[in-house]
Amino acid sequence: MIYQRVLVPVSGKNSGERASRALRHARTLCSGEIILLHVTEALPKLVGGAAHTELERSDAARGETLLAPLAEALKQDGVACRCIVACPPIPSSPWAMKKAWT
């Protein structure tokens, strides 16, 4: 096995078929931990306060639900895995967006 950790991004599109294929490939490359990552959509700046927090929680829960079956399959096969659901920051300008992701 080549790598100690492999990151597998999971978007939730295509009914998870692409994620399943990527996961099968990652298992051939990894002797350690597979990290499943889902990044939620950035929320518009128009939504704030408690509504913003609730939408973030809802998106995070959907991401966890999306990653759960993949993680369970890995655990059943004895493969170490970790799930990460990330919410991107809300940029105030294109410059701030570039700075936030670099």
Image: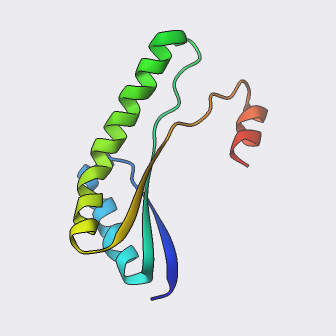
Q: Is residue 93 above or below residue 88?
A: above
Give the image location of residue 39, x and y in percent: 48, 44
Give the image location of residue 5, x and y in percent: 50, 72
Q: Is 79 or 100 nearer to us in this picture?
A: 79
Q: Tell me which corner region of the image, top left, top right, bottom left or bottom right, holds residue 51.
A: top left
Q: Tell me which corner region of the image, top left, top right, bottom left or bottom right, holds residue 64.
A: top left
Q: Is residue 33 above or below residue 54?
A: below
Give the image location of residue 44, x and y in percent: 54, 20
Q: Which quarter of the figure is the N terminus placed in?
A: bottom left
Extreme-bottom residue of the structure:
1
Task: Identify the residue at horizontal 52%, vertical 36% (top origin).
Answer: 87
Q: Is 95 or 77 nearer to us in this picture?
A: 77
Task: Identify the residue at horizontal 43%, vertical 82% (top origin).
Answer: 29
Colouring mode (rainbow / by chain / secondary structure / one colour): rainbow
Task: Identify the residue at horizontal 76%, vertical 33% (top origin).
Answer: 96
Task: Identify the residue at horizontal 73%, vertical 49% (top origin).
Answer: 102
Q: Is 43 or 73 nearer to us in this picture?
A: 73
Q: How many numbered circles are shown?
A: 0
Image check: 93 left or right of 44? right
Give the image location of residue 98, x and y in percent: 74, 41
